Image (tube, rainbow, N blue to C red):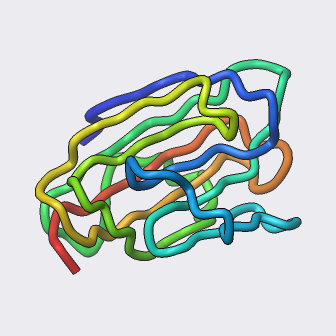
Amino acid sequence: MQVAGVDIYVNHAVLHLGATDWVPLSLALAEAPAASCDTHVAVRVRPQTGLVKVRLFVQPQSEDPEGADPAFITVFDGSLLLPDGRITVGDVEQLTRFVYRVGDRGEFRVRVTVDSPGADARAIDVTIVRSVI
């Protein structure tokens, strides 16, 4: 079920998703379409040409998340530690930030899909399974 959606303008080609605390400096995207650590995912997007659409889906305990666009390509499928039970979506400069509470603190299964992996991504679907891993 879609619980939120936000359009973000980005100046740089990276969008961060994850915990509400600071993104670790060790999280380097390099040339990959996405990179992750235990608390955050960095996703390469198309900057300065328009808004990047991000949709957030929260599912009950399930192995097969529903709702995200099936034509999108998965760039991350794993677990993220959300110490306060909230997920943040924001640009690298931290000018725009969206926060949504997904549950109690802990580890969540997160799947990030994009319309076009790499520098042309303009839409991102984030699916969170509420069950703690």
The answer to whether residue 77 is above or below residue 101 is below
| Residue at the spot 84% in from the left edge and 21% down from the top edge | 49
Q: Residue furthest bottom?
A: 133
Residue 29 placement (x, y as % from top left):
76, 64
Of residue 88 and residue 59, the one placed in the foreground of this image is: 88
| Residue at the spot 44% in from the left edge and 66% down from the top edge | 39
Residue 50 placement (x, y as % from top left):
76, 19
Res 60 → quadrant:
bottom left
Asked if residue 117 lies left or right of residue 87, the reply is: right
Of residue 106 and residue 118, the one placed in the foreground of this image is: 106
Asked if residue 78 lies left or right of residue 65, the reply is: right
The answer to whether residue 24 is above or below residue 38 is above
Of residue 114 and residue 39, the one placed in the foreground of this image is: 39
Quadrant of the drawing holding the N terminus: top left
Q: How many marks?
A: 0
Quadrant of the drawing holding the C terminus: bottom left
Residue 28 placement (x, y as % from top left):
75, 67
| Residue at the spot 38% in from the left edge and 74% down from the top edge | 79
Residue 113 placement (x, y as % from top left):
56, 55
| Residue at the spot 80% in from the left edge and 28% down from the top edge | 11
Asked if residue 111 lies left or right of residue 95, the reply is: left
The answer to whether residue 127 is above or below residue 11 is below
